[in-house]
Structures are given as C-alpha cells and as structure tokens.
Amino acid sequence: MLLRAIFVIFLFLTSSPSYAWQSGKTKYFPLECDSLINKNADKLSIKITAESGSYGTPYLVGTKDNREIWSSRFPAEKVNLAKFDYSCEADTITLLSADPGPNKSTAQLFRWQGKYVENIIKFKKGVNTTEIYKSISENQEDRFVFWAKGEQKIHITLSCFISPYTLLLFKPGSKNEFVNLGVAKDKIELSYNLRATGEYKIIVKDFVKKTNYRMRIEIN
C-alpha cells in the first residue's frame, strides 16, 4: 500500500502542469505544411514561452540552420502548453488549447500569407456575435478577418485600460480603402453599414504600452 501511494504521488507530481511548465520555459512545435510560405526558412514552428504557469503567447517562427530568422505573433488568446494541439491546411493554422481538467478544447483559426498572422473569425450557426480577449504590446497590431454579406450592419465595442489605440476596418478586396473607426482613450463603440459582400479585415493598433483588451463584434 505504501509503495502504491508513493507511486500515485509520483504520477501526480510529474503530470501536473505546474511542474511540467515553469514560467520562462520555451517549447517549439514544428509545422509540417508544405503550402505555408516559409520566407527563406528551412523550418516553420509554433513557439510558445510559458509566461504565467503553463500559459503563453504563440508565435509563428522561421528557422534556418537551427537559427531563428523571423517571427510573427499570433493575435491569439494565450494558450495552455499543458493542453495544446495544432494543425494546418493550406494557409490556415488551427490552435487548440484547453484549461487543465476535462474541459473541451477551444479552437482558434489563423491565416499566414507571409507578412502577418491574421485571426479568422467564424460565427457559429445561429450566432451573430463573438467576443475576443487579447493581450498586446506597444507597437504591435492585431489583424482579424471575417466574411459578411452586403447590407448587413456591424456593431463593434472595443475597450481597454490603456490609451490611445486605433481601430480600422478594411473593405473587401482593398488594401488601402478603409474606414477609420476611431482613435480612443478607453472605449470605442460604433455601428457601420457593410455595403459589399466579401471578406472584411479589422486592425487594432497604436497601443502605447502592453495591455489587455476586449472586443465584441455583432453582425445583423
């Protein structure tokens, strides 16, 4: 009985995320997807450094001769290294993460086209709203893409404790034509009529220091 108890305690200690992942520990997850743009890299990987417990911000990195030559941050919610999985197809990368325990994994979709990692927003059937919680540092920007029909209306609420920041909405098929949804000190809340059917892009940027923000998107 004593040996069995010691064995159970050993399994608990070695399987617990708090023991497996300490803050500052970095893990590389190789991406073997031939269709992804490599930007002169020999290998592509997802790099995650545990920042608090087993949670960290994922980066897409390219390495050459075992040396990191570039990186691009995923505009993602922090993922749990202790319960993390991923996949890729064409230019789409899926990150799967869950809290410790029997919780169902949460999927986040991203697109990589050689310059920025963009967060793909997909609304579930029968649902027209989504809420996004992100951490961002100064001089960084987050990019989100979503598909909508013409004549629909989008309502966006974005708030954080750090100011200022800028919110841009790009129209389908345009890299230069955008709607400046405002520069805010604490909160932006507005509605806009979408005149064309296609893929829209939202860019959040110009933060003065590292912060967390919350964005709610509703389309009717």
Image: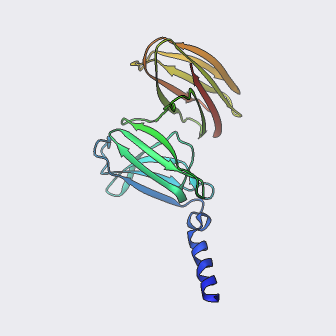
Count all numbered tags in the image, as a single digit. 0
Measured as percent of width and height from the top left, residue 42 is found at 30, 51
Colour pattern:
rainbow
Q: Residue at x 71, y 27 (%)?
A: 186
Q: Is residue 126 above or below residue 91?
A: above
Measured as percent of width and height from the top left, residue 178 is found at 49, 17
Give the quadrant of the N terminus: bottom right
Residue 140 seen in the figure? yes
Q: Is residue 64 above or below residue 107?
A: below
Q: Is residue 182 above or below residue 44?
A: above
Q: Residue at x 43, y 16 (%)?
A: 197
- Residue that protrudes farthest toward the bottom in the picture: 2
On screen, residue 17 versus residue 84, left or right, reads right
Depth check, front residue: 39 or 124: 124
On screen, residue 14 versus residue 86, left or right, reads right
Depth check, front residue: 50 or 34: 34
Q: Quadrant of residue 25?
A: bottom right
- Residue that protrudes farthest toward the front in the picture: 126
Measured as percent of width and height from the top left, residue 9 is found at 63, 78
Q: Residue at x 62, y 83 (%)?
A: 6
Measured as percent of width and height from the top left, residue 192 is found at 57, 14
Give the quadrant of the C terminus: top right
Residue 209 seen in the figure? no
Depth check, front residue: 176 or 126: 126
Q: Is residue 140 above or below residue 41?
A: above
